[in-house]
Image (cartoon, helix red, strand yellow):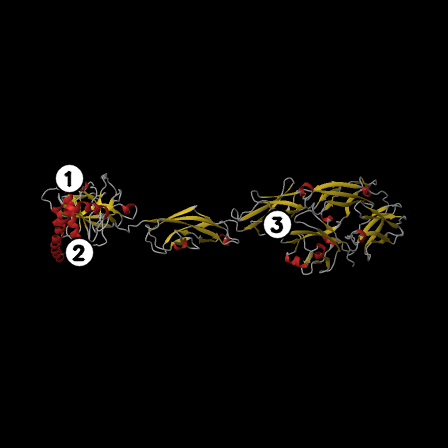
Amino acid sequence: MRRQVLLFFSVLCLSSVLGQVSYSIPEEMAKGSLVGNIAQDLGLDVKRLQARRARIHTGDSAEYIQLNKEKGLLIIKEKIDREALCGQTTPCALHFQIALENPIEIFPITVEITDINDNAPTFQKDQKNIEISESAVIGSKFMLDKAIDPDIGLNGLQSYALKPNDNFMIKLHSQSDGVKKAEMILQKPLDREKQEFTSLLLTAVDGGEPQRSGTMQIHITVLDVNDNAPVFTQTVYKASVKENSLKGTIITKVSASDADKGSNGEVSYTISNSMIGTSNLFHITEDGHLILDGPIDFEKARNYEIDVEAVDQGGLSDSSKVIIDVGDINDNSPVINMISSSNSVGEDSPYNTVVAVMSVNDPDSEENGKVRCVINKNIPFTITSTSSNFYSLVTDSELDRETASEYNITVTCSDEGVPSLSSSVTLTLQISDVNDNAPVFERSSYEAYIVENNTPGLSIFTVKARDADWNQNARVSYILEDSSVNGVPVSSYVSVSADSGVIHAVRSFDYEQIKDFQFRVKAQDGGSPPLSSNVSVKILIQDQNDNPPQVLYPVQTGGSLVAEMVPRSADVGYLVTKVVAVDVDSGQNAWLSYKLQKATDRALFEVGLQNGEIRTIRQVTDKDAVKQRLTVIVEDNGQPSRSATVIVNVAVADSFPEVLSEFTDFSHDKEYNDNLTFYLVLALAVVSFLFITCLVVIISVKIYRWRQSRILYHSSLPVIPYYPPRYSDTLGTGTLQHVYNYEVCRTTDSRKSDCKFGRAGSQNVLIMDPSSTGTMQRIQSEKSILDEPDSPLEVGYLGFILVVNCLHMFVPCII
């Protein structure tokens, strides 16, 4: 059997449905027979067909064609019977689609099934009995049953033959549906007396190659005279009925009349012949009513043509055709077939990315078969019609996995019938993540506190950043950015855990050296390329009470003693001196308080709790000891508190000689004092001689020059503090709130000392040096006697000073 293949292409301006390919093959081809080279016809490589997962989509139809992916061929999967598939419908074709993925492409394929002469004409009955009156006139017509041939065209029924044909001839009539109707016409009178029974053979022949035929026996019984045949009122009756009408529905009524009387005028109606299956759907009553016997479906057959025969009792008959149009009702919902779909799509997908392709069919007609598809609102997708019955689901805006990671897209297709019918399908689509979000810290900046003297490795606090992406793209690592603090890399101060963001102290901090510092921490995700952000972190060191107070005044030295002089005329509240101390700590740890711990006479002096001022609390009397020793303790306000002590020596006297003997023994041992006395007497004799000799000549000039040139040298006296003239008593917190002046007079020899005469301040200070053999200096507050260099008193006083100074210089030399 020869196979004919017709190939043509239709180029469609669509994004997902491309060229259309058509083939033509005969029916009844063997399984595995070649339909066509689809790979070549589509212009695709066989490897591309395999890589793009090519497959055939037939919807709800049976699958007669299959795709050989290895060779790119379409082959017969199941033997095709055109008559079973399409009946009398022409042309008969299979419609399916070939779907490709990555990217999604749809190729519509049409395979036309051509007819072969595989069916012979057949009659519904093997024989037919006809009774004919012997009075039947020449030309009388007798309707014969039609032969049925499922084939079409030339392969269908073409002609009839009647043998023997002595009394009858066959005449064919072509009807509107293309079917040939056969009538047997009497061409010679019948004579019952000569031949009562006659048998004829009716043969139906088609036009195929080879030619096929079917036969039916006709048995004729000759009756007595009945010379009028029934006559229908219409040659063609037209009626309509809605599909799915109930069984028993009256479709129409036919009517025929017979001019004869009696039994020869009684007419009965029969459905003479019809297409296969029609006899089960209709029947006709004796009075001519055509009744519906079974369900009819517009989608299976849109009209029916029925031959009705009217027969009288004498065997004469007439025929008429009833054409029944089936009316469509909206009884079918749209059918949605998902041809290809994606399970996931990247959030960076561009506009109009195809997510799914589907076909939608509604078997109904006209408005009932028009379909409109929509999807649920407020999602970044839209559905578009790419061609007849094909729809594509595409993106129409940007996707963001962080806003919505999954979409349940419901496609609803509705027809335009009344009432409208619809169907829907739901597609679940995952949005795959791309690294489009940088880590974000929980705060714009961080501040943390740590107490000084911490242990290295101590956890200070934690920075936290979150990444809205997913999986590896959301895995955050923390990095300490390079910077320096006071010229030192910040990594020597702190470290950050890459996984947890915990910041650890690398060293022990000292508040007195560094009070705070800043650095930046970077949070970086694990995407490719990675995204990052940073945040500023400020660490503030909190003070601990780790430093005791430091006493600035009075200065405690190993060799010199500072003694504060208090006149015996001092009143209550007399300011003796002020203890000045500082604490390098801060806050409450630096708040100082002063307390009198020990005193020679606790009833005589008190210390200001806040300012450290030592004042008298009663009138000084003659009974009070000259030498007073006070121990003052200075405490800070820390927890626990720290303290320092200072010893203040106070001389209660009105003149220097009074206290000289009291203070000469402060730091000398007995052996040293005995030796000193001997050499002092010797030196005094020598100096006295020199003094008498030179007193008149040079004393005044020498002393004056000595004051100017030697004032800052040749002295080992301790620090001599004094308050400025405008000193005022001010309550304070114990820290040094005023400016104090200190003047130092020393020589290079620690065992030599010298004096500096300055303008007197508001206080009297007694300075004693154990190495100076009890030399003392009185500085008066109002006006120094040395301010009058020409007076005899000054000259004598200077002479006395010279003696003392010479003793100071000579005695060490002698020793």
Choose between 221 and 54: the one closer to the eye: 54
Q: CA distance from mark 3 to mark 1?
A: 106 Å
Q: Earlier in the sequence, mark 3 or mark 1?
A: 3
**Tag nearer the camera, 1 or 2:** 2
**Tag nearer the camera, 3 or 1:** 1
Q: How many residues crowd mark 2 within 10 Å: few (<14), some (14–19), many (20+)?
A: some
Identify the element where label 1 is drawn.
loop
Q: Which residue is mark 1?
A: 572
Q: How many residues crowd mark 3 within 10 Å: few (<14), some (14–19), many (20+)?
A: some
Q: Is residue 453 above or below residue 623?
A: below
Q: Is residue 170 visible?
A: yes
Identify the element where label 3 is drawn.
strand
Q: Which residue is mark 2?
A: 812
Choose between 55 and 601: the one closer to the eye: 601
Q: Earlier in the sequence, mark 2 or mark 3?
A: 3
Q: On the rendered structure, is 142 left or right of 754?
A: right
Q: Which residue is mark 3?
A: 356
Q: Position of residue 643 (x, y in %)?
A: 23, 50
Q: Residue furthest left?
A: 623
Q: Is residue 204 above or below residue 254?
A: below
Q: Earlier in the sequence, mark 1 or mark 2?
A: 1
Amino acid under disc 2: Pro
